[in-house]
Amino acid sequence: MYLVTFSHWLVAALFAQWAWACSPRSDINDQNNPFVIGDDGPAPAATLGFAINHFGLLTTNLTGMKHFYGDILGMRLLFDAHLTPEYTVTYMGYSQGGRNGTGFQSGAEMTRDKNNLYGLLELVQFNVSDDRLVGSTKRTNTFGHVGLIVADVEKAQTYLESRGVEILKRIKEPLSGFTGSIQNAFGVGEFAGEHIAAKMALLKAQSLIGMEMFLMVQDPDGNLVEIQQQDAPSSS
């Protein structure tokens, strides 16, 4: 009886950790709660209908990026637009006929609805570029990471490992150290300078947002992909 009760408690505790990982906590009066909930008034009337439709990544490895985000992470290809033999614009995204792709949509259907969709990925390649593009895990820049939610983060970790994806941080493991790929992507790595006291405080504070429950991988260009547990459906 004790073992059953303890196992139920452990499962509940883990789900509780997942539920508020990088999400606002309800104990807003707790002095250790880092979240300050917004109290903005109504948005300007002129912005009615504004929404983030897509974000764009530059690449010199379009084939590899399409394989990673499509064949491995499950995004669908809307289209490749070959504007010239050297310049290609690619759009990818998850089917939005249902949450997390539970409702199938063809590429033609998603392309038709492109400007009414959310969270699309645009990949742009100039295949004769002399520039050396550097992903967020390699060099801190203004792009931090791609954020995904999944129905089961443990199963996602097992799946990604089976597909040969390098795991930068496993779930249930906190960040450690002041340098590295994840630190670069979060803007606190070697390029940010020493600042040991500030970085030490950040390492101690990471549990406040459930950082240990995040799964971290990188795409073929070295951009960080942060994967979090999807919230359980509301009981209300």
Image (cartoon, helix red, strand yellow):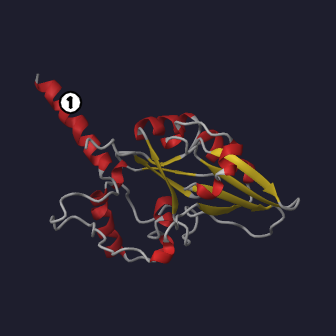
Give percent across and percent down for residue 62. 73, 53
Residue 121: image quadrant is bottom right
Disc 1 crowd rating (10 Å Cα; few below 14, some 14-19, many 20+) is few
Furthest-right residue in this view: 85
Residue designated by label 1: 7
Residue 4: image quadrant is top left
- For badge 1, the amino acid type reads Ser
Element assignment for label 1: helix
- Residue 149 is left or right of residue 139, and the answer is left
Furthest-top residue in this view: 1
Residue sitting at x 22%, y 64%: 33
Give percent across and percent down for residue 190. 49, 71
* 192 w.r.t. 11: above or below: below
Residue 83: image quadrant is bottom right
Give percent across and percent down for residue 71. 65, 39
Residue sitting at x 32%, y 63%: 203
Q: Is residue 222 visible?
A: no
Q: Quadrant of the N terminus?
A: top left
Residue sitting at x 44%, y 35%: 155
- Residue 216 is left or right of residue 222, and the answer is left
Q: Is residue 176 visible?
A: yes
Depth check: give the residue in front, 166 or 34.
34
Residue sitting at x 33%, y 41%: 233
